[in-house]
Image: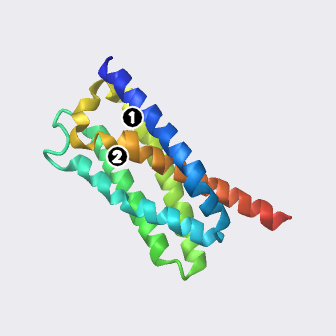
Amino acid sequence: MTPALLFQLHLILGYAAWLLCFRTYLWPRLRAMEAADAHRAIATLHGFRFFGLAFLMPGVVSPDLPASFAGYAAYGDLATGLLALAALAAYRVRPLFWLFVAAFNVAGLADLIGDYVHAVQLGLPEMAGRLGVLYPVPVIYVPLLMITHLAAIVLVLRGRRTLGQ
């Protein structure tokens, strides 16, 4: 199997495993929560996205990993993580909380979609070994991040439907 095929298989299986876990254990709990509490739980997970800065840490990834990918991924994650932390800090001030919830979800989705686009453009699947110890990030951590961003959108749309009835 080629490195690109292994990487793509890992990515697909990462999504499959998280979707099964999310559907069985997380989604029922998030749906049962008050909207603000559900978004607070999602923000808590995304508050750890400062971890993306590790793409810039010398020795963590290969120096051959394209700097354009590493920088974009690192700073997009940092921005999303800071916005998620701001949402958590603003939880008691609901208008501000909702503003930061919207901001971290828009920034986070844009970051992840942009990372996928950059990865394809740069041929990252063919050079996935250059991710070094961060290899699990795109195949295990990113699927959960993407799923929770999409869940946040569904929760917002569901809330609007409920308010409109």
Task: Specify the farthest residue to the top.
Answer: 1
Q: Which circle's residue, 2 or 1, is located before the other in the chain?
A: 2
Disc 1 crowd rating (10 Å Cα; few below 14, some 14-19, many 20+) is some
Seen in the picture, residue 89 relative to 127 is either above or below; the reply is below
How many marks do you count on the picture? 2
Seen in the picture, residue 31 relative to 110 is either above or below; the reply is below
Question: Circle 1 — which element?
Answer: helix
Seen in the picture, residue 131 relative to 9 is either above or below; the reply is below
The C terminus is located in which quarter?
A: bottom right
Task: Specify the farthest residue to the left.
Answer: 59
Q: Are marks 2 and 1 in contact (CB under 8 Å)?
A: yes
> Could you tell whether 97 is left or right of 32 in the image?
left
Circle on res. 132: none
> Could you tell whether 33 is left or right of 144 in the image?
right
Circle on res. 118: 1
**Residue 79, image quadrant:** bottom left
Measuring 55% from the left and 73% from the top, which residue is drawn there? 97
Question: In the rendering, at what x and y percent does residue 129 appear?
Answer: 24, 31
**Residue 63, image quadrant:** top left
**Residue 62, image quadrant:** top left
Measuring 29% from the left and 46% from the top, which residue is drawn there? 71
Circle on res. 73: 2
For the residue pair 27 and 121, the one nearer the viewer reads as 27
**Dot 2 amino acid type:** Ala
Question: In the rendering, at what x and y percent does residue 102 appear?
Answer: 56, 62
Disc 2 crowd rating (10 Å Cα; few below 14, some 14-19, many 20+) is many
Question: Circle 2 — which element?
Answer: helix
Question: In the rendering, at what x and y percent does residue 159 appear?
Answer: 72, 63
Measuring 56% from the left and 57% from the top, which residue is drawn there? 26
**Dot 1 amino acid type:** His
